[in-house]
Image (cartoon, rainbow, N blue to C red):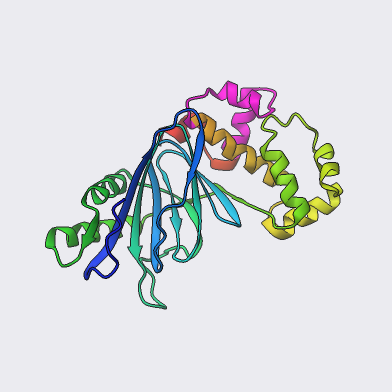
């Protein structure tokens, strides 16, 4: 952990780094979340799932999660995950940290340069603008933040008890072995009712939500080294080609090209 004391004058960027090495079981972590600091979560190795009360984001290689100040979250990990984070001091009210800074959590593409800047900052612990060398690093980091591009990897979570129950049952049924109608009966809701709940609480249809849930599960498995064929069959697709069509429709690239970027 390398969060410096908040009263240190001139410190504009802080950092946090930890490596989760349990290759057999999943675990979770609630990193330091100091008040008034925006955060960029990144893993130099492994795949994370970042969860808030309202949403979940899967973070595959080359991606990070932008967390505005004041949002509580936890990071779920499986296998070996090398977590590296930046904390950026929030500007005064009414000003943005950088142009187009998101006011909501989002998965973003991390450039190769920004990756190296994150690693360097974690080694230093914090960047102080009163130190010329560190001030230059702060400037380059801010320049790289300007080109962050959000990608659609979030899974909004419903609040209604029936819809929450449905989402939990889907999560524990990765191969879609149980028909949707059976899951709906277990939740005490009709298909029409569940459609209404998901549209109202997640801004997605039930079918869209189910496809996104499968996509995020697939990203975790593919990043762990599983083949497209294995993942496709596990998630209930008839063939690898059918899975690739879904993947490309959602993310604009085939799985192979996606993980090469």
Magenta-drawn stretch contains 245: yes
Q: Is residue 245 left or right of residue 21?
A: right
Which residue is at a point 58% across and 36% down the rendered structure image? 217
Q: Is residue 23 left or right of residue 2?
A: right
At which x and y percent is residue 185? Answer: 86, 42
197, above or below 214, in the image:
below
- Pick whichever, 55 or 106, lies toward us: 55
Which residue is at a point 53% across and 30% down the rendered structure image? 221
Which residue is at a point 44% across and 32% down the rendered structure image? 22
Q: Residue 254, can we see it?
A: no
At which x and y percent is residue 148? Answer: 39, 54
At which x and y percent is residue 1? Answer: 31, 50
94, above or below 1, in the image:
below
Q: Residue 27, can we see it?
A: yes
Q: Which residues are magenta?
A: 223-249
Which residue is at a point 66% across and 40% down the rendered structure image? 211
Magenta-drawn stretch contains 218: no
How many numbered discs sit on the rendered protein?
A: 0
């Amino acid at each position: 952990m390398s969060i410096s004391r908040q009263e240190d004058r001139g410190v504009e960027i802080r950092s946090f780094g930890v490596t989760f090495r349990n290759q057999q079981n999943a675990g979770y972590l609630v990193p330091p979340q100091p008040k008034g600091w925006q955060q960029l979560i990144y893993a130099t190795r492994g795949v994370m799932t970042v969860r808030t009360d309202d949403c979940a984001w899967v973070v595959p290689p080359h991606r990070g999660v932008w967390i505005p100040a004041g949002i509580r979250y936890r990071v779920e990990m499986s296998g070996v995950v090398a977590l590296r984070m930046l904390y950026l001091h929030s500007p005064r009210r009414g000003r943005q940290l950088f142009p187009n800074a998101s006011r909501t959590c989002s998965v973003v593409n991390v450039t190769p340069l920004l990756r190296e800047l994150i690693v360097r900052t974690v080694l230093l612990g914090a960047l102080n603008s009163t130190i010329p060398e560190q001030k230059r690093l702060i400037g380059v980091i801010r320049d790289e933040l300007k080109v962050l591009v959000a990608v659609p990897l979030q899974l909004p979570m419903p609040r209604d008890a029936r819809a929450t129950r449905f989402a939990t049952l889907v999560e524990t049924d990765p191969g879609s072995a149980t028909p949707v109608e059976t899951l709906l009966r277990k939740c005490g809701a009709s298909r029409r009712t569940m459609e209404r709940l998901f549209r109202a609480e997640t801004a997605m249809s039930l079918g869209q939500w189910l496809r996104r849930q499968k996509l995020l599960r697939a990203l975790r498995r593919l990043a762990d080294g599983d083949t497209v064929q294995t993942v496709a069959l596990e998630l209930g697709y008839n063939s690898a080609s059918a899975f690739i069509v879904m993947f490309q429709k959602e993310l604009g690239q085939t799985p192979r090209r996606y993980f090469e970027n």
